[in-house]
Amino acid sequence: MARTYDCKVEDDKGRPVAEAWCRAYNITDPANPSLVETQYTSGSGIASFTALPDDAPVDIIAIWGLQVKYFRNVFSTSGADIVTAEGKAHTQNTDLYAKGIRSGTSFPATPSDGEIFFRTDEGKLYLYEA
């Protein structure tokens, strides 16, 4: 049985974001998150996930333009932590499309355009833009 989750994506002014690219990751092993489902937001800013794993922590990332919103542990009993990022930061050349989002307490050395990195010591998500 799969879990479902409706992820509401809003910009920094609280307006719904249509056509944001949203990806859900199983983060049972945070060093190697695995992509489980991809959705796009509707005109009302909702991405409806229908095939999320049972009994596993799930993070969701929403990307539109230069904006990134990261929903950490969406099934947490205390609610999801939401982290936003914009603009430039140095991140490692990890394959977001294949492996998900890497994290750590310092930035890796080699950035690539569009790479995303979560700083666990700062609680911030960074997007590298070349």
Image (cartoon, grey):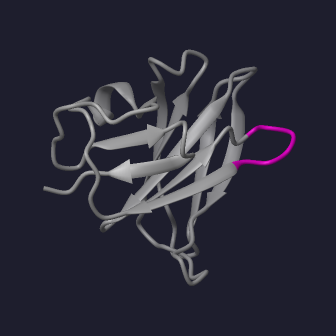
42, 103: nearer the viewer = 103
Q: Is residue 112 magenta?
A: no
Residue located farthest toward the left when viewing the structure as drawn:
130
45, 109: nearer the viewer = 109
Residue depicted at x 76% and y 38%: 75
Task: Look at the image and give the residue range highlighted in magenta.
Answer: 75-80
Q: Is residue 119 above or below residue 100?
A: below
Residue depicted at x 61% and y 18%: 28
Q: Is residue 11 above or below residue 100?
A: below
| Residue 113, position as x, y percentages in the image | 16, 49
| Residue 120, position as x, y percentages in the image | 54, 36
Q: Quadrant of the N terminus?
A: top right
Residue depicted at x 67% and y 54%: 6
| Residue 20, position as x, y percentages in the image | 42, 62
120, 1: nearer the viewer = 120
Q: Quadrant of the C terminus?
A: bottom left
Give the left or right position of residue 89, taking residue 63 as reference.
left
